[in-house]
Amino acid sequence: MEDVFQYLSINWTLMFCILNVFLPAEASRILKTVGSSVNLPCHNESTSNFTQLTWTKNGVNLFSYSSKGSLHRTAEAAAVNVSISTSELQLYALIIKEAQKNHTGNYSCVSTTITGVFDQKWELIVTENENDKKDDRLWIFVGTAVVCVCVLVIIFIWLGLRKRCKKHKEGVIGSRQEMRAEDIYENCLEIEQRNRMQSFYCKVH
């Protein structure tokens, strides 16, 4: 009878390990804004007696921590600027000091033990701050208004210069016409005076 209970307990342990390995764990969703700090804890009970612990993002390794105390940080972890905590309060937690939109992704803490593999998943979503969105909209509005004002000023200046040039051109044409009229008038007087002089001269002689 004791052999049967022992056999059943072994089978239940084996099934539990198989389920942990092959069944995907449900990811806990975390929503953060840009610039905020993020702590993704690894609450696996197996972290106290693991042989290896690994943090991944979208299936890509970030950190590997062995029970011997050696920590390996990959180039991907350096690229996204994340670190791992070794303090007792946040043991093996993944830390992001200033979250950015490229930190959005699926993170997983996988700990390998003698009894099996345990996986804890986190879905991190980093969104823009509402205040930043409002500031961006304000700057866009101000920039658009400044451009419109500059265009209107340029149009008004161009119209003013065009009107002034037109008046100047009309004034030049008018003065030329007046000069021609004066020339014609003076010529007529000179001709009339010359005719009178000629007729007077003829009468005298």
Image: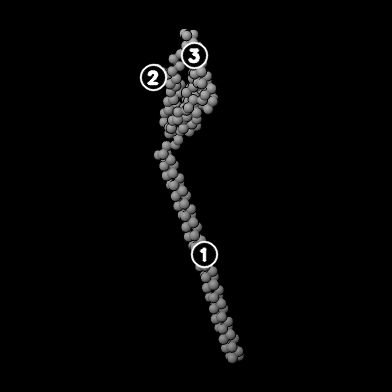
Residue 83 vs residue 120, the one in the foreground: 120
The three-letter code of the residue at mark 2 reads Leu
Mark toward the viewer: 3 or 2: 3
Mark toward the viewer: 2 or 1: 2
Q: Which numbered tag is attached to residue 143?
A: none
Residue 42: x percent and y percent?
44, 21
Vertical side of 68 occupied by 74: above or below? below
Q: Which numbered tag is attached to residue 166?
A: 1
Q: Residue at x 53, y 22 (%)?
A: 22
The three-letter code of the residue at mark 3 reads Leu
The residue at the far left in this view is 89
**Mark 3 highlights which residue?**
8
Q: Residue at x 44, y 36 (%)?
A: 128
Element carrying mark 1 = helix
Tell me which label, 3 or 2, sits earlier in the chain: 3
Q: Which residue is drawn at 47% across and 52% down?
A: 148
Residue 74: x percent and y percent?
53, 21
Separation of residues labelled 3 and 2 (CA atoms): 37 Å
Residue 132: x percent and y percent?
42, 39
**Mark 2 highlights which residue?**
89
Tell me which label, 2 or 1, sits earlier in the chain: 2
Q: Callout 3: few (<14), some (14-19), or many (20+) C-alpha neighbours within 10 Å? A: few
* Residue 187 visible in image: yes
Vertical side of 184 occupied by 165: above or below? above
